[in-house]
Amino acid sequence: MTHIILKKIYKLYLSIIFKIWDLFNNNKTNFNWNFINKVLIFRLDRMGDFIATIPMISALKQSYPKIKIDILTTKYTSDLANNVEGINQVFIHPNDTKKLKNKYNLIIDPHFSPYLRYIKYAFLSFSLKGHFRLGYNIGIKAIFYNIRAKISHAKRYEGEINLVF
């Protein structure tokens, strides 16, 4: 019983934080794909996680062929990223990260883990100052996004989950 009460208090606490954040976050506008021309997707974890992001990249490029999709990844997965169809340019984290600031209409963070160590990725999307920042509405890291995707709790392959975007 105590666990349920604590869970409700935590959800209330997060909703209050999100509402306060949204008051001060003046980037929140209506999202429209017609105004998006440069997209940065970053995947800074393992090779398999990057592979799970490829269906999202393909779907995005098929739906909006005129947009340029750049990838920020690690040196470890950069060779794979360079061979994915639809990717315009590959940047290596942390070396190239600073030069990406203020260059994108949309920044997508496909890391959906609620663990605290993934807050750094959410903060990275915020610090790159894209007009729109898309990430999953999970835990405290969601305050860094102005577009929040909901994730279902059904057990699915990560590539399917990333298609939610």
Image (tube, grey):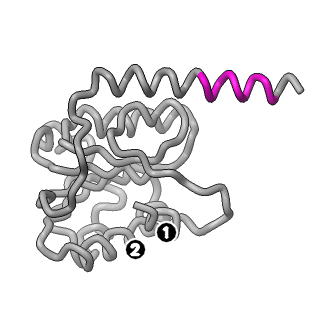
Where residue 55 is drawn, which disc sits there?
2
Q: Split into 4 quadrants, where in the image is the C terminus?
A: bottom left
Find residue 130 and report its horizontal and vertical position in percent. Answer: 19, 42
Please tell me whether mark 2 sits on a helix, a strand or a loop: helix
Where residue 159 is drawn, which disc sits there?
1
Identify the residue shown where x is 27% and y is 27%: 25
Identify the residue shown where x is 26% and y is 76%: 63
Question: What's the distance in space between the residues labelled 2 and 1, CA to CA?
Answer: 6 Å
Q: Main secondary structure of the magenta part?
A: helix
Farthest residue, direction front: 30
Where residue 94 is drawn, which disc sits there?
none
Q: Amino acid at mark 1?
A: Gly
Please tell me whether mark 1 sits on a helix, a strand or a loop: helix
Find residue 73 and report its horizontal and vertical position in percent. Answer: 31, 53
Find residue 101 and report its horizontal and vertical position in percent. Answer: 14, 38
- Residue 80's place in the image compared with 152, above or below, is below
| Magenta residue check for 102 | no
Q: Are marks 2 and 1 in contact (CB under 8 Å)?
A: yes
- Given residues 161 and 29, the one toward you in this image is 29
Q: Amino acid at mark 2?
A: Pro
Image mark count: 2
Taking the image as drawn, is residue 111 in sight?
Answer: yes
| Magenta residue check for 9 | yes
- Residue 50's place in the image compared with 149, above or below, is below
Mark with earlier residue (2, 1): 2
**Callout 1 environment at 10 Å: few (<14), some (14 to 19), or many (20+)?**
some
Q: Magenta part of the protein: which range?
A: 4-12
Find residue 99 and report its horizontal and vertical position in percent. Answer: 11, 41
- Given residues 62 and 92, the one toward you in this image is 62
Identify the residue shown where x is 31% and y is 69%: 57
- Given residues 150 and 84, the one toward you in this image is 150
Quadrant of res 51: bottom left
